[in-house]
Amino acid sequence: MKFTYTNKSCLVLGAGAAVLASTLLWSTPLIASDYSFSGESNTIFRMRTSITDKTISPAYEYLRLTMTDKLSNGSGVAFHLGAWGRADLGDKPDDHGTNGNLQYAYLTYQAAKNNSVFTIGRQFISEGVAAERIDGVYLRNDFKYGIGVSAFAGSSVTTEALANPKYQGGDLIYGSRISQSDKQMYSIGLSALKSESTTTRNYREEEGLDLWLRPHQQVDINGRSTYNSITNGWMENSYAISYAPTSTLSLGADFSHVNFKDYLFNVTTPALSVNNPLWSYNNKQTAYGAGASYSASKNLTVAADYKFYRYDQSGDASYFGAKASYKLPDNLLAGGGIHRMNGDVDKLRYTEYRAFIAKKINQADLTLDAINVNYDKNINGISNSYVVTGAAGYEFNPKLKVRGDLQYSKSPDFDNEVRALVMATYTFDTKFAAEGGTKSEK
């Protein structure tokens, strides 16, 4: 298999890889260190009834482990692992019955200076245009004058849900980001990624611009633009601005435009697959909105927001309303809101009401949340769609917490649905001194 580098991404990709390779490959002397081992286990039991009246009761185990070695010169080495498994205790939702996945498993070295990082293994990359899970390597380093460079290379990790060969993510993916920033005022980054496969050299090829600006102490501007060089179209342009003239008032506005044909090209995420009926491959979405939040007192906060959506194929819709929350000194929080959706189709013409209350009693947390949607016209014979959720949690000690949720809902798509969840979370953290033996445990 031969990979060639003859595209507009090469400038960013080549510069990032070359600079980082020459700065991060060094050895460090053996010096005193402190070791630590920490982790978290989440055991989850779910229950729901399917459309075919099956009782689906899966049990999940999510396990996260971290082992670190902090050296006395400020550098450190760490290993991170995350995995999950599922077993069906009731009716099987599919032919698999049990399932599992290695989410991440990587070794990383963090240098004492220049924010230098080298990571190898299964990891999630979030650098500019890239938001990928890969099996590969990642490097990063900061230089003078606020310049930072990162690069990665490996193979894309896709889930079992994407069994269609068209969405396997290619055989090789690589990319880089170059940024220049001032921590107090701005950060601007240029990034690119490319994916190649045995059947096509141009499986994916994307470039991006990301920025954060603070022209004034109370003003923040952030956004990104991404371009698809294979389809020759802008995937997404998304920008937002926030302004806090006082400590009690916050204002904001945002704008975004998404071209799904370019955005969903050879995606590796099941929820964004063009086979998903929620998406229209040839559709475009433009959205803009504004909002305000005001703390009328120490305990009362009120907010209002407006959002307009325009779809080339499915029409327009406006979503607007207000909400408020009130917090009492005895750990009681209550609130609610009302929103209106005005769309060109019946399913997007409704009024939404919400009310919630949360109370903390010693080590216990109690929550009740109710949402009701009143449609202008019946949808599948339903005029009111609602969901009521009750939750309770208890902290036995800093290591062990248990939480339970019970949800009842009715909607045009599912009549009288009941869902339940019980989750037990156990955390641990053990440290060892350089000379050996337990230093502390919590």
Image (cartoon, rainbow, N blue to C red):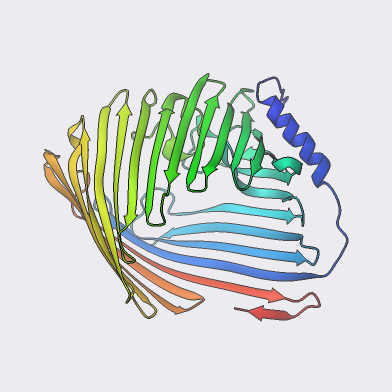
| Nearer the observer, 340 or 85 | 340
Residue 29, located in which quarter of the rendered image?
Answer: bottom right
Q: Residue at x 64, y 49 (%)?
A: 122
x, y (%) of residue 108?
71, 54
Position above or below: 426 against 101: below
Residue 344 falls left or right of residue 358: left
x, y (%) of residue 363?
39, 79
x, y (%) of residue 360?
34, 74
Position above or below: 313 against 101: above
| Nearer the observer, 162 or 425 | 425
Position above or below: 208 against 134: above
| Nearer the observer, 46 or 284 | 284
| Nearer the observer, 99 or 152 | 152
x, y (%) of residue 118?
73, 49
Q: Residue at x 26, y 29 (%)?
A: 316
- Residue 402 in view (yes/no): yes
Residue 392, located in which quarter of the rendered image?
Answer: bottom left
- Residue 410 in view (yes/no): no
Q: Residue at x 31, y 28 (%)?
A: 310
Position above or below: 104 against 269: below
Residue 415 falls left or right of residue 395: left
If the image is split into quadrants, where does the C terminus sit? bottom right
If the image is split into quadrants, where does the N terminus sit? top right
